[in-house]
Image (tube, rainbow, N blue to C red):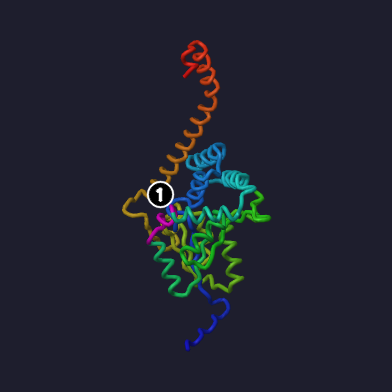
């Protein structure tokens, strides 16, 4: 008979907190889910246009409170009335098709190491909490904290519950979770890739920058935090991601504009075809 392990003393349990985008998953997890939704007919050209435009502004001007508010408003308006169950099912498909192939093996190894030591592992993301929970479950993590969209009767209402889990709100959520689960933050770990994760990293005793952007790398150097980069030999890894993201945004914008152009020209083309048919009786027979 196996002896039961004694329960840990209150406030002594250790956890590891991981940002998701560009820390665990290469690129933006929500973007990959959105692409899957578009392929399945959930998005219209109008939705795609707005997403492309917001992404384009993000790449050109960087992040701001106004930009984040605009993204939040746009995303909530689009998901209003969608089935939560169907969204989760599509998320599972997209994980198998795309996300599983974009996980950084180095970060996965760190997650596995924490699990082997009996640490709780939590994903903390600004993406919808459903995406965070999906990735957490597939990686064997304890759970996930994320942005919460209100649900009623199994459908999204288009209303945000609380704040978008971003910047300092990540640190607030981690602190609340630690109190609820008796976690010792001074003995715990946190991992992130951008200055948006700095508040969360500062709440624990063992912060680490993974695939950091320029600002977080400099901040980590000043604070003496360890830095790990799993983006391969390409020293311009983050720039490549940004360029790819911008290219995708421009491509999407061009596709929408082409679609609009075709729609506007269609009546004229039909009219021209009718005129030609009227002038050519043989054509009418065909």
Decide if residue 33 is in sight here: yes
Decide if residue 218 is in sight here: no
| Residue 164 coordinates in the image, percent (x, y) | 60, 53
Farthest residue to the top: give it.
279
Q: What element carries label 1?
A: helix
Residue at x 53% of width, y 70% of height: 185
Question: Which of 119/150 is in front?
Answer: 150
| Residue 138 coordinates in the image, percent (x, y) | 47, 63
| Residue 107 coordinates in the image, percent (x, y) | 41, 62
Residue 64 is left or right of residue 236, and the answer is right
Residue at x 51% of width, y 39% of height: 52
Callout 1: 10 Å neighbours few (<14), some, many (20+)? some
Which stretch did the figure color magenta? 97-105
Residue at x 61% of width, y 49% of height: 82
Q: Chief secondary structure of the magenta span? A: helix
**Vertical arrangement, residue 141 with respect to residue 278, above or below:** below
On the image, which quarter does residue 224 sit in? Answer: bottom left
Magenta region includes residue 270: no
Question: Which of 269/229 is in front?
Answer: 269
Farthest residue to the bottom: give it.
1
Magenta region includes residue 102: yes
Farthest residue to the left: give it.
233
The total of numbered circles placed on residues is: 1
Residue bearing mark 1: 238
Residue 234 is left or right of residue 1, and the answer is left
Farthest residue to the right: give it.
152
**Vertical arrangement, residue 26 with respect to residue 190, above or below:** above
| Residue 273 coordinates in the image, percent (x, y) | 50, 18
**Vertical arrangement, residue 129 with respect to residue 60, above or below:** below
């Amino acid at each position: 008979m196996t002896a039961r392990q004694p329960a840990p003393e209150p406030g002594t349990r250790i956890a590891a907190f991981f940002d998701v985008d560009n820390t665990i998953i290469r690129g933006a997890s929500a973007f990959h889910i959105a692409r899957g939704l578009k392929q399945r007919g959930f998005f219209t050209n109008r939705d795609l246009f707005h997403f492309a435009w917001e992404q384009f502004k993000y790449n050109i001007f960087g992040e701001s409170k106004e930009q984040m508010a605009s993204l939040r408003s746009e995303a909530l308006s689009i998901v209003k009335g969608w089935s939560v169950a169907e969204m989760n099912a599509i998320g599972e498909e997209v994980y198998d098709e795309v996300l599983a192939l974009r996980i950084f093996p180095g970060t996965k190894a760190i997650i596995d190491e924490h699990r082997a030591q009996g640490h709780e592992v939590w994903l903390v993301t600004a993406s919808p909490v459903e995406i965070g929970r999906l990735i957490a479950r597939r990686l064997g993590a304890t759970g996930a904290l994320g942005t919460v969209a209100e649900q009623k009767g199994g459908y999204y209402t288009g209303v945000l519950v609380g704040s978008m889990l971003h910047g300092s709100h990540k640190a607030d959520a981690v602190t609340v979770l630690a109190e609820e689960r008796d976690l010792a933050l001074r003995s715990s770990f946190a991992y992130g890739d951008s200055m948006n994760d700095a508040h969360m990293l500062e709440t624990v005793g063992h912060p680490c920058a993974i695939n950091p952007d320029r600002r977080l790398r400099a901040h980590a150097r000043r604070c003496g935090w360890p830095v790990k980069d799993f983006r391969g030999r390409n020293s311009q890894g983050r720039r490549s991601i940004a360029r790819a993201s911008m290219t995708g945004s421009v491509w999407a914008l061009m596709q929408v504009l082409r679609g609009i152009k075709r729609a506007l020209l269609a009546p004229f083309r039909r009219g021209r075809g009718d005129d030609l048919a009227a002038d050519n009786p043989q054509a009418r027979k065909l």
